[in-house]
Amino acid sequence: MSPELEAWKIKGKYISYGPLNHQIFVKELGNTQASAQKTLLLLHGFPESSYSYHAVVEGLLKTFDRIILFDMLGYGLSDKPEKNYSYSLLEQADTAFTVWKHFGINGGHLLAHDMGVSVATEILFRHEINLLPASFSEGLQSITFTNGSMVLEMAELRITQKILLSKYGKLMSKVNNYSLFKQQVISANGNKNLNEKEIQILWEASTLKDGNKKVYQTIKYLNDRKQFEKTRWLPALGQTKLQIHLCWGEDDAVAKVAMAHYLKKEVCTNATLTIMKDLGHFCQLDNPKKWVEYVSEFYKKMK
């Protein structure tokens, strides 16, 4: 394991999830007694892990007193079961609440990226119909969405993503390698700002516990996106009274900036829209300092 990923792992721990005791890697930073108003809950994307936030957490702790991160099942340092776990967005949302309950979290600000955005929209839906767990009594304080395919028909999926979703997905997982992974990550980002080391660690985290061979399963979250987007998640986004932040890397080649403008104009007109100039899909890795500045400005202006 690379020194960087090892250092990240050492400062976290594992908790058990479900009847089969799947192990989830979790991290808690800052003041463990912080209020919901000063707590930030982070959700990572695909094919990423909590490590994707490694370069921004210190900056975020200037605004928040407490940050909770974890690797969803199928990602990073967590277990990657081949059986007995659906990898559905609904189950990933259940996993999030299990993690937050473990830490005694009763509410907080939610910030999500990429696939995590879809998990966040499921959590928002449950908020809107009053189905959040009793332990989450203080509820959501706000949600920031960054570069996720919230309107799937507008997303420009990479060729690898399309193959993984097809009947050839399992075969594609078996032949997946670093060279192909790197090519697709750079292509998705939409610019050439990502450094080689960050891409290498993205790949390393994805290959732990043979995760790269199971990516045909984890990417099926996009099928949930197709099924529930128009009937469940976009309506919730349109009706919510929560403060919503659409914070978008302008160079994103998959969830293009036009998607953010569409969401602001047609779905959640009360949302705050921030376009992050010169940042791509993997925006928090692209330019961590600028990303923190863009994200934090929203919280500074909150009522």
Image (cartoon, rainbow, N blue to C red):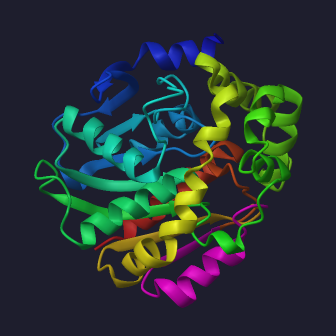
Q: Is residue 294 above or below residue 292?
A: below
* In the foreground, 165 or 277: 165
269 within the magenta span: yes
**Residue at horizontal 50%, vertical 58%?**
117
**Residue at horizontal 52%, vertical 67%?**
227
**Where does the image place residue 21, in percent across and percent down from the top left?**
31, 21
- Residue lying farthest to the front in this orientation: 167
User: Which part of the image, by quadrant, shows the C terminus?
Assistant: bottom left
**Where does the image place residue 35, in percent across and percent down from the top left?**
17, 48
**Where does the image place residue 139, in percent across and percent down from the top left?**
20, 59
User: From which residue to which does the magenta span run?
Assistant: 253-275
**Where does the image place residue 292, in percent across and percent down from the top left?**
54, 51
139 within the magenta span: no
* In the foreground, 93 or 49: 93
* In the foreground, 259 or 230: 230
User: Which part of the image, by quadrant, shows the N terminus?
Assistant: top right
**Residue at horizontal 70%, vertical 54%?**
281
Q: Is residue 137 above or below residue 4?
A: below
Q: Is residue 122 left or right of residue 170?
A: left
